[in-house]
Image (tube, rainbow, N blue to C red):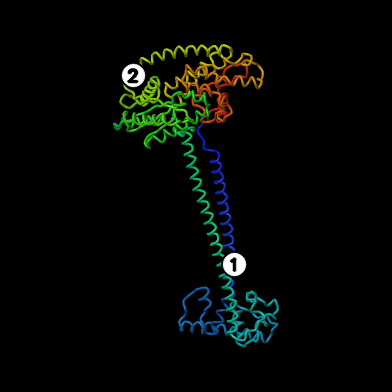
Amino acid sequence: MKPCRPSKQTDSARRNYGRTITGLAALIAVLIAVTGTFAVHKADKISDEYDYVSRHLLPLAIAVDNAAGRYDTFRARILGEGERMTPRERETVVIDEGRKIQSEIVSLVEKARITSDAAPTVQSRQHGAMIVAGLEGAVESLGETIAEWPSSARTDDYHKTPRFLLGKTHRSLDALRESLDGFLEASADRVEAHERHIIASIGAFAAITFAIGMVILSLIKRMVGLQRLAEMELERLATRDTLTGLYNRRHILERIAQAFASAKRHGQPTSLAIGDLDKFKQINDTYGHQAGDAVLASLGGMLSGTARASELVARVGGEEFAWLLPETDGDIAMRAVERFRAAVSRQPLWRTERITVSAGISDLMHAADADDLYRLADGALYWAKGNGRDQVCLYSPEVVDALSIEERALRLERTQTIAALRSLARAVDAKDTSTKAHSERVAELAHRLALALGWTRARADKLKDAALLHDVGKLGIPDAVLFKPGDLEPAEYESVKRHAALGAEITADALTAEQCEWIRHHHEHWDGGGYPGGVSGEGIPEGARLIAVADAWDVMTRARHYGTVKTVDEALEEIDRCSGAQFWP
């Protein structure tokens, strides 16, 4: 069988959250790229400003400050280089550098005065010295003089002279210094603006990323929550009965084995009760299966509300329930189950109908293993139902003695009835040579499937008996319809669809109510598209699901007057393809 799956809504929500997280992560990557590009661009702008200042304005600032006898405040303020000079250091710099610069200035100025057409040689740092010379009155407007020089005389140093100094006259060092400071302040302002832009962009990126990160974190938390919900849903699907909300047969059998082993290991008592609704078939026959389902759901709710937190209750069959009571001996379990039985008998579970339950209890005193614990409780239930119903029986050797006498008589009668019904099943198969031994094969395969799923052998034997008679209702279908070679008319098909319900009615006196329900529903589909009741999902009795698979397998792999025989691989592929639609997934 395929594993259970979470709901489509849960899967869809998880996929949507995953796509949203991927999109937001991509958005963060784009923001990183944009912010990084913007920051690099602004950093380049800052670098250009510093480069221009250090290469072109710094020599002017040094020349002006040295000429005026001041310390290079620009370098200290903007570039942060060096410490403030002592008076002696400053005097040394001013005297040494100043003399060199002044001698160069005088030479250049004289050349400029004598022949403006000449091409004076402008050496390193001389553009700054020339401007200072002009400010000292050696030249009225050195900027204009330089601008008048022929282009052939304009050296690289000339082109490095800041444009705002060309064509302007500065009458004093202070005027030049003021103009220079204005340009430096503007440069510093631009640097600060670029820095603010970088900080603002990084801040905006951090804020947006933080917001997106919080959204992603929230989505991840939701995905984790959905994952947990999916796991819980899978656990529920694997361990719960959908109609009653109680644990299913497979789960409680596992827990019974665990509880038995733990009780034996620690020397503690443990009890098991198996209960059954009395005359449940009459409710289904009188009021319909919806009424029966409502009764089962109500009974499950009462049982769940009665059991303690440490105890487990489960639906193990059509109207059969199990109640595991750890650390509880048989006498205490007897009183607890008796209180539940009395409560059920006092409360109408469907309209005004009074419904009763019978129950059998076993404990560790007489059980050799977990299967034995279940078998003994089931035997005590059998005694309770055979002795008037609406009572609770605790298993004991006396019950065994009383049961053995009655059971032999009942089994003899039942064996005779089953033999008669088996003859009927063979009669059905004999009507069509292509279906010879079909019922026996279906019964054998259903029995093997039940054992593989963990059913007890006694319960699997019951399924085998029911599967043997699954087609007995076809005795009521005319041969002309049953063996019609072509397509059936709608009315004819409705007649064929009656055979499952008819089979349940025919076997009602020979089989248990649960076995009759297996026969009645063995043509139901998991998606609700089957017959006779259109029951779907967990509403289909587990035994009916197994008979359906066994029946379909034998039909596909055996020669018939309709259809073609499939290989084993083809049949397996077909069952897998129809899983979740026709068959139990």
Where, by quadrant of the figure, is residue 11 drawn?
Answer: top right
Identify the residue shown where x is 37% and y is 36%. 308
- Characterize the local packing of mark 2: few (<14), some (14-19) or many (20 or more) Cα atoms within 10 angstroms: some
Above or below — where is 290 with respect to 75?
above
| SS at circle 1 | helix
Instruction: Between residue 534 and residue 95, name the one nearer to us.
Output: 534
- Residue 520, horizontal then vertical, whole percent: 53, 22
Residue lying farthest front? 352
What label sits on residue 3 in the rendered view?
Answer: none
Instruction: Between residue 105 and residue 325, name the one nearer to us.
Output: 325
Above or below — where is 558 with respect to 94?
above
Q: Is residue 235 rendered to the left or right of residue 480?
A: left
Q: Are marks 1 and 2 in contact (CB under 8 Å)?
A: no
| SS at circle 2 | helix
Q: Is residue 503 rendered to the left or right of residue 370?
A: right
- Looking at the rendered structure, the kind of residue marked 2 is Val
| C-alpha distance separating marks 1 and 2 | 100 Å
Q: Which residue is mark 2?
A: 400
- Residue 534, horizontal then vertical, whole percent: 57, 28
Where, by quadrant of the figure, is residue 475 drawn?
Answer: top right
The numbered mark, 1 or 2, whose residue comes first in the sequence reads 1
What label sits on residue 45 in the rendered view?
Answer: 1
Above or below — where is 512 with respect to 72?
above
